[in-house]
Image (tube, rainbow, N blue to C red):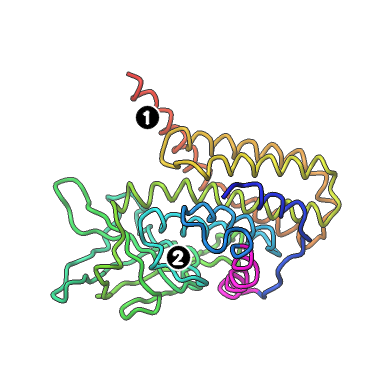
């Protein structure tokens, strides 16, 4: 699969949003059934076995979203599925349901902060205990992708990723109290996930290390895919609202750059630096397009401004990854 078919679709198809209510699960199910499945059948006879159709998944979702929150959901779910595919866990992911990535705990998502435990059980499987916080979309999820510890090997916390249905015995999901913090996308809810002796089959444990093969790459995949899905949403709005052709072309260029990164390995320093550069280019383009938002419906423009104001914490994390990529390059050349 190349990028051309999906980009041609974004430029030529009717830019009509998919109206499916205010529930993330309902919108995502409608998107998968009414938009993504027909696209895959037309484009390549089904899901691309190389996993490259995950990027198209995010773009198509952003393009038909009727609000920034649904573009974020589409990009996030495309990123989760890309990660699951790379870790051999695609069969564990429900076709039409949301999957929440549950890594963070009280102290964050660094290996030293992960205390949720995955203990071997007498039945040949495992038992999962602990608590996750800031689990994005967990209240709407059909499945949870959870990072837990098999125990320590000296100073090393041996982490694994497991994927289980959200209604599995021993799982409790409660909306997270955000205090005075106002979410940029209020439809995208976060949760505290309590895990009490949750039964996990051996086949529900994904390949690889939970930190180096799941948490770290997911950060970059998520940044890239959500950013691209949001740009696709912006492009659809631009076309509906009569923006100048040059502005639409600017957005197209951002998607071409995102696609070039998405179709390559995302764990190399060059990928991290490319994502950082794309983020800056996106910010510049949005600043240049500020005057065009006067052409957009007032409700949609207000939702865009609110969503765009919520990137402070993420921006700091992205900067640390950019610095880390340069440090890796310097270390490899000495």
Label 2: few (<14), some (14–19) or many (≥20) C-alpha neighbours in 10 Å:
many
Residue drawn where x is 85% and y is 44% of the image? 244
Secondary structure mostly seen in magenta is: helix
Quadrant of the image occupied by residue 180: bottom right
Which residue in the protein does label 1 denote? 328
The percent position of residue 132, horizontal first and vertical second, equals 36, 64
Q: In this view, does 92 lie to the left or right of 182?
A: left
In the image: residue 167, left or right of residue 177? left
Quadrant (top left/top right/bottom left/bottom right) for the C terminus: top left
Q: Which of 112 and 8 is in front in this view?
A: 8
Residue bearing the label numbered 2: 100
Q: Position of residue 163 (x, y in %)?
A: 36, 66
In the rendered image, residue 77, in percent from the top left (x then y), is placed at: 52, 61
- Residue 37 belongs to the span the image colors magenta: yes
Q: Is residue 237 above or below residue 94?
A: above
Specify the quadrant of the image occupied by residue 161. Answer: bottom left
Which element type, helix, strand or loop, lies under badge 1? helix
- Span colored in magenta: 22-39
Spatial distance from mark 1 to mark 2, Cα to Cα?
Answer: 30 Å
At a point 20% along the width and 59% down the height, the residue shown is 150
Q: Using the image, determine if residue 32 lies above or below residue 247.
A: below
Identify the residue at image location x=82%, y=47%. 292
Q: Position of residue 243 (x, y in %)?
A: 84, 48
Viewer-side residue, 284 vs 86: 86
Q: In this view, does 272 lie to the left or right of 201?
A: right
**Earlier along the polypeptide chain: callout 1 or callout 2?**
2
| Residue 103 numbered tag | none
């Amino acid at each position: 699969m190349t990028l051309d078919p999906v980009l041609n679709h974004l430029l030529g198809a009717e830019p009509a949003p998919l109206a499916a209510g205010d529930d993330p699960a309902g919108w995502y199910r409608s998107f998968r059934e009414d938009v993504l499945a027909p696209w895959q059948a037309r484009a390549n006879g089904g899901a691309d076995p190389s996993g490259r159709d995950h990027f198209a998944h995010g773009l198509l979702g952003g393009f038909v979203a009727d609000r920034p929150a649904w573009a974020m959901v589409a990009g996030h779910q495309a990123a989760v599925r890309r990660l699951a595919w790379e870790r051999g866990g695609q069969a564990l992911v429900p076709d039409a349901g949301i999957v929440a990535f549950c890594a963070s705990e009280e102290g964050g998502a660094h290996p030293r902060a992960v205390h949720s435990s995955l203990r071997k059980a007498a039945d040949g499987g495992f038992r999962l205990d602990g608590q996750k916080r800031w689990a994005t979309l967990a209240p709407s999820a059909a499945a949870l992708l959870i990072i837990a510890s098999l125990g320590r090997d000296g100073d090393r916390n041996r982490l694994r990723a497991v994927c289980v249905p959200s209604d599995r015995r021993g799982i409790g999901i409660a909306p997270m109290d955000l205090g005075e913090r106002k979410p940029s996308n209020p439809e995208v809810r976060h949760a505290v996930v309590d895990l009490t002796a949750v039964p996990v089959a051996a086949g529900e444990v994904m390949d690889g290390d939970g930190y180096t093969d799941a948490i770290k790459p997911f950060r970059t995949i998520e940044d890239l895919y959500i950013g691209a899905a949001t740009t696709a949403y912006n492009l659809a709005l631009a076309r509906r609202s009569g923006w100048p052709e040059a502005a639409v072309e600017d957005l197209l260029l951002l998607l071409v750059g995102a696609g070039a990164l998405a179709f390559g390995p995302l764990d190399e320093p060059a990928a991290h630096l490319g994502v950082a550069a794309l983020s800056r280019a996106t910010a510049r383009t949005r600043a240049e397009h500020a005057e065009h938002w006067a052409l957009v419906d007032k409700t949609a423009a207000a939702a865009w401004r609110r969503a765009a104001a919520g990137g402070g914490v993420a921006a700091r994390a992205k900067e640390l990854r950019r610095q880390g990529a340069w440090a890796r390059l310097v270390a490899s050349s000495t």
